[in-house]
Image: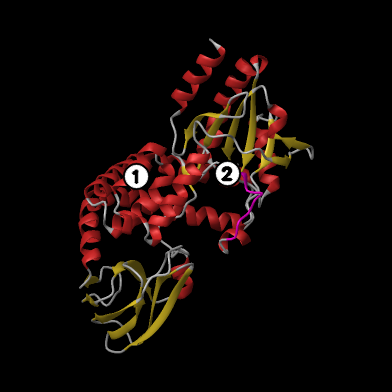
Amino acid sequence: MKYIFTALPLVLLYLQGQAQEQQPFTLKGNIKGLPNRYVYLSYATGGMSYKTDSALSKDGKFTFTGKLVQPVEGRMYLDKKAAMYGEGDMTNFFMESTTMQLTSTSGKLKGAKLTGSKTQLEQDKLNALHAPVMAKLKPLSDAYNKGNKEYSAGMRGKKSEEALKPLKEELDAIKEKMEPYYEEMEKIDKSFIDQYPDSYVSAQILRYRVSSMPLQEGEAAYAKMSPAMQQSMHGLEIRKELDGLKAGSPGSSAHAFTKTDIEGKTLSLADFKGKYVMLDFWASWCGPCRKGNPHLKELYAKYQSKGFEIIGISDDDSNHEAWKKAVNQDGIGIWRHVLRGLDWSKREKNLPNPEDVSDYYGIHSLPTKILIDPNGVIIGRYGGGGEDDEAMNKKLKEIFGA
């Protein structure tokens, strides 16, 4: 199971788009049984901005008006704080520049039905395809959420790592059981994208799926979109993701970075010219990364004397101690280690960060490994958007022999 750190559309993102003419919309709600209170609606408005509006619900009825540059996914919720964490009573739907109605007889936003939006009809089709898989996934998801709350409470209560270890292992085991269902959902999504290449629903799915697709597959899906869809907010983000993935895929020159390593020494990729170098993008909190370390140690012992080097690039910029501890525990201090250079303050403001090595290689999931030849050219990508470990083993065997 890979850890994806491109967020799924549970929270509203800053989306980049061209300046387009805004058109008005009206959204009328009739949630029978909803107490009189304020209801909130958040949605992208174009460029790098989004809007949060509120309306007072009286006897379950309320009205929102505004303007949109294109169909976008909106989120309606009752509690601002809870909504930030994907919790509380809320619902998501695709809004358009038209008159729409949101209705429910349960007294809750969750499960409310939106009519009047053609894009939402497409989302409804996808939801129906997801439903059987989601039903099978729910017990595992509920168990994981319950265990994760216990783990978080233990962390806040400053329980020792040893005390939390059984719970962490249980959570990892649940994740493994969930993986086949996520793979099934991925197949459904890809089939939907192929069937509806000009749907805003497809564009949104592809925006979040493309970073974990092989480059050629992502490019093919993007090419099927109309020019207008390619210039939509999600279309522009897809192009950006593909360009990043291309920079970290075979045939591209490896970005030459310089960092301070785990021992406080300067490390430059240029110093490794003449050798085959594996960049291992990982993190102390990434279970699959840690599980793969014994195999990496085997490869290093087998090929290091033949000109093979590994550079670990960790996602632990905010927790140096966890990074150092993981390196020691896993016995991987036999190769060099640096931090990626993540700066959340810049990322949240959508500002460029030249120090973030992961951005130059299109890294969006862990673990991902990049193989570079003696001339500084990428010849292999394994993990997010690349091949599997079996292909990696085969490639190294071709280079160095048995």
- Which region of the structure is painted magenta? 351-357
Identify the residue at horizontal 49%, vertical 50% (top origin).
Answer: 5
Which element carries disc 2, helix, strand or loop?
helix
Q: Residues within 10 Å of mark 1 (few under 14, many from 20)?
A: some
Residue 28, quarter of the rendered image: bottom left
Which element carries disc 1, helix, strand or loop?
helix
Q: Which mark is residue 182?
A: 1
> Residue 146's spot in the image, x, y percent?
43, 55
Q: Nearer the viewer, residue 164 or 135?
A: 135
Indicate the amino acid at tag 1.
Tyr
Q: Residues within 10 Å of mark 2 (few under 14, many from 20)?
A: some
If the image is split into quadrants, where does the N terminus sit? top left
Q: Which mark is residue 360?
A: 2
- Up/down of 125 relative to 308, above or below: below
Residue 25, quarter of the rendered image: bottom left
- Residue 383 counted in the magenta span: no
Q: Is residue 4 left or right of residue 325?
A: left
Q: Which mark is residue 312?
A: none
Indicate the amino acid at tag 2.
Tyr
> CB under 8 Å between callouts 1 and 2?
no
- Residue 352 counted in the magenta span: yes
Sequence-first disc among 1 and 2: 1
Identify the residue at horizontal 50%, vertical 55% (top origin).
Answer: 150
